[in-house]
Image (cartoon, rainbow, N blue to C red):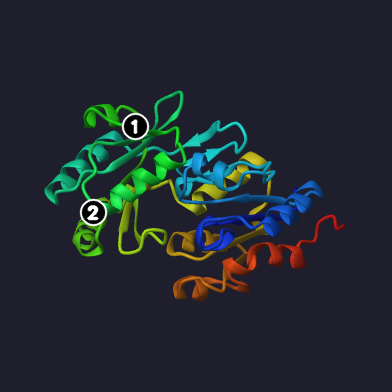
Amino acid sequence: MKDELYISDLDGTLLDGKARLSSFSRNELNKMINQGLSFTVASARSLASMQRLLFGLDIKLPVIEFNGAFISDFSTGEHLQINSIDSGVIDEIILDLAGFGQVPLISGFDGKKDRLFFLEIRNEGEEWYINDRKEVKDPRLARAKNLEEALGTEVVCLTIIDKEEKLIDLTGELENKYSNDVEIHLFENPYSPGWHWLTIHDKKASKDQGIISLTKITGHSLEKLTVFGDNLNDLKMFALAPRAVAVENARDQIKEAANSFTGSNEEDGVVRYILENWTGNRR
């Protein structure tokens, strides 16, 4: 059986408030990984985003992206597992979204590459996101001619960006109708304050299910699992892990679910915890 496994969320956890990995965290993680540390990340972000933000970090294990929609090789981008949303469920959800005047951004895999389609920019929150993706030259980004083009992929995520008051009722209706089919998250974008994101993934696309799949691929034991998080989409992996570590800046619900604690994301809390607790090969 393999050694301890450490898995960290990114935003608000491993990354600082400006979505950066500090040089201290990068250097110390690389040293430990080279000594045998089993470390990877589980995030709502795409692999393209992870590769840019974690540039220079020598992650050897697969990563969990889109909250578990993809299990992917960090270096090559190959998807080892895809949990896409059932096409029939998508069709029904699209109709419900239209009833609320919403058109989603659509993330998926076309058999060759990852795609991020948008049809129109309807508000400043969407404009911020599209401009952000253009600025970093996200290779997934494309303007779709129509919904049919965007939905002609293995769809792993539908994303709606709007003000919270416009999304609360919609979220409730979707949860009532599709709770057995999809995972739904509503949260404020910390990098674009005032704008909320409603994301929809397949029911199998959750961080706990992603971790279970990852351990089957790598041969690690769940009994030696440590996870780090700060937000509500980390709750399921906190329930799964024997050691669930909340950073100091975590939401109250995460702190209540945790059984261990560390410093904030601005203080390299994740890496300092691993330095103090990893029982593998030491320098």
The earlier-in-sequence mark between 1 and 2 is 1
Location of residue 163 in the rendering, given as x and y in whole percent from the top left corner: 24, 60
Q: In terms of depth relative to the viewer, which is nearer, 116 or 5?
A: 116
- The label on residue 174 is 2
Distance from disc 1 to disc 2, alpha carbons, whole Å, reads 27 Å
Q: Residue furthest front?
A: 135
Q: Left of 220 or right of it: where is 231?
A: left
Q: In terms of depth relative to the viewer, which is nearer, 54 or 255?
A: 54
Location of residue 1 in the rendering, given as x and y in whole percent from the top left corner: 75, 48
Q: Which residue is located at x 56 percent, y 58 percent?
A: 15
Location of residue 74 in the rendering, given as x and y in whole percent from the top left corner: 60, 39
Amino acid of disc 1: Ala
Q: Left of 76 or right of it: where is 125?
A: left
- The label on residue 51 is none
**Label 1's element?**
strand
Looking at the rendered image, the quarter that the C terminus falls into is: bottom right
Amino acid of disc 2: Leu
Q: Residue furthest top?
A: 112
Residue receiving disc 1: 142
Location of residue 207 in the rendering, given as x and y in whole percent from the top left corner: 49, 52
Q: Residue furthest left?
A: 99
Camera-side mark, 1 or 2: 1
Residue 84 in which image quadrant: top left
